[in-house]
Image: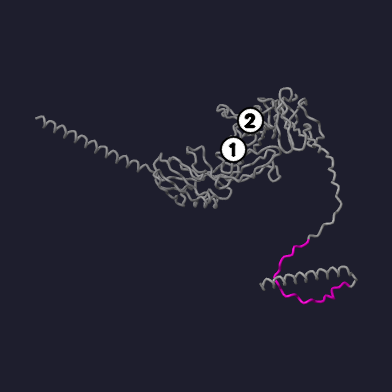
Amino acid sequence: MNNKRINKVVSLVVAFIAAIGLFAGIVTAQAVEVNNTNKQPLQISINYAKELGKGHTTPGALGQLSPEMENMWKNLPITVIDSQGQELEVAKQLNNRCERTVGSFANGEKVTIKVDTSKLPEGYNLSWESDYTYPKPTRNYAEFQVVVDSSMPVRISLNQMNVKFDLQGGKVDGQSDAIVNTVKKDNTVDFPADPTKDNLVFGGWFTELPDTDSYRQKNVVGKRYYWNSKSPFSDYSRDWMLWNDEKLDPLYDGIFLLRAQWNARVTFNANGGVFNNKNENTKYEVTIAGKKITFAQAPTREDYQFLNWVDAAGQNYNPGDTYILNANTVFNANWKQIRSTVTFKDGDKTHATVKVETGKAIDTDESMPKNPTKAGYTFKEWNTKADGKGDAFTGASLVNSDMTVYAIYTKDSVPTQDPTPAPNPEPNQPTPTPTPELKPQPETPAPEPQQHIGMISKTGESASFAGLLTALGFSIAGLAIIRKKKMMEENK
């Protein structure tokens, strides 16, 4: 019994769920059908300024544009990207209201519009209509998003606009007149070369929010915005808004004013000292010319006391003082030396260094270094000149600044010695001629006597000739004796 009741309940629940599902499907189908029925083609119209500084005109029918402008509008490449990412090219045809249409979109759907600005007429660019509820452009003004509203067409706005560059006393290529350039098709403008101005630094092109109730409430009066060659320009978002004082830059005139900012650079030169105990001997600060600066804190320097900052005119300033900087300015640290260094040089070498309180002598609280030595010389003194022609320096000499003194020597003298007397020479004695010892010689045939008549001196030196004959005789006799002795020994 219980099982039958349970099965019956389950069957009822299943039937109920099926009925709900069927109802939901019917409602969804009806909603889709209604939604598809509400989709409409996206209408796109043109809105343009006929002349520089004039208002925009939206044609309400064909023939209200010049033939050239109508033909351009008809053929201007436009792409619509729907919420699903599908790209649709807008047909190149106009309806009776001079509009172009594309696709089918529901109200509230967000789409992206892309325009090929290279096909715009010369001198024209796209406007970003800030009075519409369009989100901010995603890429200059050639690509933007809109929320579809079938009661209002999407407008493609064209305008003409110039940008005026006020050099503010500077010069470009030697000229100081303002430069005016036309905004290009891609909403950019050619910027001039950076101007120059004596004793100042160019800081860019700016606009400055004026003093109005609206800006005062937002606390942005005087806020500067800076512009460069990548900045987009259009009349709706630039010339028709208060970026500058209206007295300087009138609204709706088709000209957007940019002014050159001139900066002044202040340099704090530590003048031998350092900042923050680092190896930084200079500090720089750049600010808008005419602004107030605060003097840097004092640097430090070994053996010196910081006094103040001083400018080129000799005016003194203390750290923390304020100053209106109208031009590039250098401030130098002013020091008082409280300890001086005396360097003692011995030839090319440093013999010693001694620090002493400035204005006092070394002997006051220090000691002079030990005198140097040099072979063959005697140390004489320390002198303020390397050649010894300056002032002698001693432990009592006052030291008023860093200085170098030099070792001076005198050459040692060489002692004179008495000359050693030369010994008396003895009289020359005749040297005896030694008698040669005769040694036995082997017997050889006696040479035949030869006549040496040709060797007799022609000058009559008879004594020499007689001696020669005597020596010859002794030689022959000696030979004869030796021969006879040998023969006797053989006979035995």
Give left or right: position of 24 versus 411: left
Give left or right: position of 405 versus 240: right
Q: Which residue lies furthest to the front in this view?
A: 492
Three-letter code for the amino acid on which mark 1 is drawn: Tyr
**109 or 416: nearer the viewer:** 416
When the figure is inspected, residue 175 is found, relative to residue 265, above or below; the finding is: below
**34 or 218: nearer the viewer:** 218
Label 1: how many Cα within 10 Å (few below 14, some 14–19, many 20+) = some
Q: Which residue lies furthest to the right in this view?
A: 460
* Magenta part, dominant SS: loop
Tell whether label 2 touches label 1 (CB within 8 Å). no
Label 2 sits on a secondary structure element that is loop
The residue that label 1 is drawn on is 226
Q: Which residue is drawn at 56% across and 50% down?
A: 121
Residue 329, quarter of picture: top right
When the figure is inspected, residue 338 is found, relative to residue 136, above or below; the finding is: above
Residue 2, quarter of picture: top left
Numbered label tally = 2
The residue that label 2 is drawn on is 275
